[in-house]
Amino acid sequence: MSILIKNGRIVTASDDYHGDVYIEGEKIHSIGANLNIEADQIIDAAGMLVLPGGIDPHVHLDMPFMGTFSSDDYASGTLAALHGGTTMVIDFVLQTQGKSLRHALNQWQGRSNGNCYGDYSFHMAVTDFNEETAKEVKEMIEEEGITSFKTFMAYKGALMIDDGQMVGLMKEVKKQGGMVTVHATNGDMIDALIAKHRSEGKLSPLYHYLSQPEITEAEASGRFCDMAEYTDVPGYIVHMTCEGALNEVRHACRRNQKMFVETCIQYLILDASLYEKDFEGAKWVMSPPLREKKDQKALWAGLNQGLIQVVGTDHCPFKWEQKLMGKDDFSKIPNGHPAIENRMELLYSEGVNKGKISINKYVEVTSTNPAKIFGMYPQKGCIAIGSDADILVLDPNEQHTLSADSHHMNVDYSGYEGWKVSGKCKHVILRGKHAIENGKVHIQKGYGKFVKRNKVSKII
Ligand code: URP
Ligand code: ZN
Ligand code: ZN
């Protein structure tokens, strides 16, 4: 099977030029001006952007959480991702406290194997670090190609580890050539605020937001940077939302530390005023919560300063009936919101189209940097000869409106209902297959494959 993409504007993290891309099998075979090659299929990309397929390194599919499961499974989630220009996702395996990493991986493989449309990988979340877990770190990296280890500084009793475990894990991961990633918020401070608000009868979604003030994220981010510096492990802070946390990283960078930062599309474009909509605010109950306008400004600046390297989604959808589990108590609302399908178009529209980031920065933060940071570059994350043919053809001029009526995520509302977007994903190619053509799906469930990743120390 071969595909020739003709006359497009090819954009990578560093280049921007007009040309053709010829794909043979799963790989990019040639790139050039006016390529004169016969192909099984020709895509006319005149007037369109030809971009590396998006990589979303922060999604939760079919995940057991807060007494329920996130509502997109591996089929619906990776298919929705493809509709939105994301060809690969990295999901999270969660260790059950008291059980092994292998036990958790088996469970996650049981739900994902053979069910994905798009390519995927896993981060391994270590929720119980002990001598046995330590031995499994090497095994995960060398046998499974799982090179990043997620930690939680919150969600005590289920996911949180203490600082002693964190330092122990960091030392082991450093030794084996991996990376430690973190949900950096101070769990004890948050739990105390939740208890206080509940005891005062303050039970609406607004109090989810008021239980996680900026300081809880800034403090934990700074503490994580300090522990990463002490152990010399590469670190990655997921879903950063605020100026205070970013300033902690700014200080850490002065010590020449390897610390990477991800923000998510929602933190760049939505703000905490949504929590004033009574229970409708539950749609945006996520952790950390949406913040203020001044934080959005800091995050956009952080992208341009290179302090934030990645824009993900933290896609963790729950249907409305699941959100209703917390109708009388904000602390029981399952945390998370749907965005896997919307990230590429929203960031193009709000970021590139409105002049907040350049088109090269867009490619960098949605694809190239996730590939580099998580050990997949140049197989993924670029348009280059020999790379996987994962390509998004985006029409920068087509306007459309986001809605739950037309999205493909398995959730009955949209966090962006009625949002007008400039820029539409027209064609999506995944490892040489024309997966999506103007909304039509041409691949089957199971085409998506698990991607083993390289040791982190080799690529950063
Ligand atoms: O609210 C969120 N973010 N839900 C998913 C779990 C996490 O903390 O990333
Ligand atoms: Zn988190
Ligand atoms: Zn998450």
Image: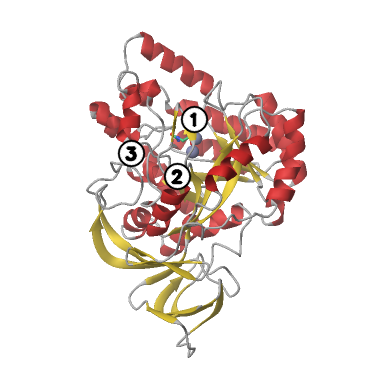
Measure the C-alpha gap from mark 2 to mark 1.
29 Å
Q: Amino acid at mark 3?
A: Lys
Indicate the quadrant where residue 137 lies.
top right
Q: Is residue 192 left or right of residue 136?
A: left
In the picture, the disc for residue 217 is 1
Q: Residue at x 49, y 67 (%)?
A: 12
Q: Amino acid at mark 2?
A: Asp
**Residue 411, horizontal then vertical, whole percent:** 33, 42
Instruction: Tell us which disc is closer to us: 2 or 3.
Output: 2
**Front one among 219 and 429:** 429
Residue 396 vertical position relative to residue 124 in the rendered view, above or below: below
**Residue 417, horizontal then vertical, whole percent:** 25, 45
Q: Residue at x 46, y 82 (%)?
A: 40
Q: Please name the residue that numbered disc 3 is placed on.
A: 293
Measure the C-alpha gap from mark 3 to mark 1.
17 Å
Q: Please name the residue that numbered disc 2 is placed on.
A: 73
Q: Residue at x 60, y 73 (%)?
A: 386
Q: Residues within 10 Å of mark 1 (few under 14, many from 20)?
A: many
Say if mark 2 contacts mark 3, CB within 8 Å: no
